[in-house]
Image (tube, rainbow, N blue to C red):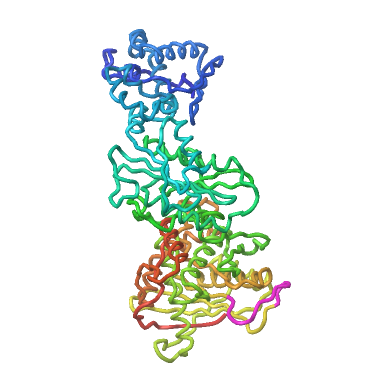
Amino acid sequence: MTVDQAGPDTATSPEGERATPDALDSLGRWTLRPGVSVTVLPHGVHLRGWITSVTLEGGAGLPVLWGRLAEALAGDGGAELARAAVAGSPLRAALVTVIGQLHDHDLLVERPAGEKGDAAGENGDAAGENGDAAGPWLGAVADRPAEAAAALIRSRVRVLAARPDGPLARAAARALDRAGVRAATAEAADLPDGQVVLVAAGPGGPSPFAAEQDAEERAVVVGLRPGVGFVTPVGSARQARADADGLADRLRPREAPGGAEHPGLPALLASSAAQRLICAVAGLRDPSAEAGDARLISGLPAALVAEREPLRGEYRTWAGPVLVDADRVRPRADVRTLTEALARIPVLTDRLAGVLDEPDPGALPQLPAALVRSSVAGEVLVSGSARADLARLEAVCRAAELLLGKGESGLEGEGGPAVGAGAVHARGRALRRAGAAVRQQGARAGDTAGPFGGAAPVPWSPEPGRHPQALHWWSVLVRRLGVDADVAVSRLDTVGGGAVFHAEVQVQAQVQAQGRTATGGVLGTAVEASADEAVAFAALSAVVRVQAAADAPHARHLVTPSGAVASLARPEATAPWEDAGWTTAWLAESAAREPELQEALAALTGWSQQPWEPPADAHADVRALWSALRQCGFCVLSARPGHRTHPTLTEGSR
């Protein structure tokens, strides 16, 4: 920042006298944080704090001005400096600007109580129990160091382990002691071997494992297994124990029995656990918040996972299977944008703490359609779409549906749950599935039988004037890939008058196109709001199927795209040159039609939105997946339709 940019003192009256106190008047309350390093520059000054820094630049007099300000911060608090800097003068404006920058970058801290009055000894009598808890490190990181120190002094910290003399428990006790917090070590026979619980409770609080927990209780569990270890988020003792059980279960496949344990692993884990507990008790930010890792999701807890080879520890967003504490049980906001959805996929597919396999393009082709591959219960799943990010999202949703349904296969199954990134996406996926089922039932009944009487052709051909995306994907299929295909378009009119279009791309025999082989029959289907849109998604689905047949012939599950994702992928604004031929503009058009389409599909199928929950006898993995999805803002709906309104079907072929 350039100090020359500072304007005149705004806290002045028309007569030139200050109307209200400014930052210089209140400087006596503040001092420079311990540990702040200052480097004087020829025309400025650079300050570096615990996690922030700022460079102030100006004229040759700025280093002199800083020297006067530094003396005030270390001495009388600026009383003399405030008298010397006349209200409304450039000097005072520059001082106020510099002080404001110090506040903005968290480089100032309130002076200790002893320097402002007689409160210095307020908590001094208790300091003996927890040692020098108000050491310089609290001044360097805490907003209110005295209050943080008082909270540590009042706390009762215990280290509980099945083996109190084990390396993990001893390392935790040493880490607490080095921070000025003394802890009592005790045996807890019910704890698994390799787990240590650190508990801090207020004075006179109940046992950490009593039925009635103290409101100020904080606990964290550190676990060490062969080759891997973890530190849970801070919570109640029950929540920390539940998180520990969940993490131990997730990390079990990563254990590496045999071989010498790295001597630094217990120290890394124990010191991290002690740091998290101390920060929670003192009211400081959790260490995970200081990691600066954009992969961590705001509002969700983070667990530290450490590995032996190579020795490292990393915070990972943790969506645990058991929620006890109120802040963990609280419902999470639904995902509303594609960016939010994509940020949560790494949480669900984390290689160490996730619940799903990560979709990965690998060596699969990305043109003309983008393909990704993942594993579901040992079987290969392939997903394709116009872009790789959309394919990844659809792969995650379908993999979750298959695992929640435990063995439900096929893309059009009605009975299993529908998963989406938020309620709108999940509802769109469920309604399209139900709409496709209605169309299949009508096809089996015949054009003039049952509820599908009154058939009349709705022709579609790739002629000028059609939507650019429909023409593009049809051209890719029949010209670039050389597939001799037909498309049948059906319109299902509901009682309410809303239009629903179903498109189906078919071939009569086995497809041989540019070295790609696919079985004849239906290559792609879509249920959308217009004929062109249905053809576009059906042709894109056919392209995905032809590509997957050649490049992933052993895939057990194939996921094809639909317009349900448009509500997430709709951009806030499109560039002037992005017409309907661009994917972003196309999705924006689809998103605008999505509410009306969903209303029409609901009237057509009789489907009503009902949340899906695992049955009482569901496997623990199913409950863990369902819980993780909900915590990440994903929505799980029952896809079973109710009573259906009889539609009218009209159909025609290319």
Q: Is residue 489 magenta?
A: no
Q: Is residue 300 left or right of residue 330?
A: right
Question: Where 645 falls versus 320 (above or below)?
Answer: below
Q: Residue at x 44, y 73 (%)?
A: 416
Q: Which residues are magenta?
A: 512-523
- Nearest the viewer among 429 and 584 is 429
Question: Where 502 falls versus 363 (above or below)?
Answer: below
Residue 533 place in picture, x, y as percent: 50, 69
Residue 165 place in picture, x, y as percent: 49, 42
Asked if residue 335 shows in the view, the reply is no
Q: Is residue 485 left or right of residue 93?
A: right
Q: Quadrant of residue 620?
A: bottom left
Question: Where 124 falls versus 465 (above or below)?
Answer: above
Residue 67 place in picture, x, y as percent: 46, 12
Q: Is residue 521 magenta?
A: yes
Q: Quadrant of the C terminus?
A: bottom right
Q: Quadrant of residue 149?
A: top left
Q: Is residue 277 left or right of residue 37?
A: left
Q: Residue at x 48, y 88 (%)?
A: 444
- Nearest the viewer among 44 and 120 is 120
- Nearest the viewer among 627 and 568 is 627
Chief SS of the magenta region? strand
- Nearest the viewer among 506 and 312 is 312
Q: How many marks?
A: 0
Question: Where 499 falls versus 129 (above or below)?
Answer: below
Q: Is residue 565 left or right of residue 265?
A: left
Residue pushed farthest bottom?
Answer: 449
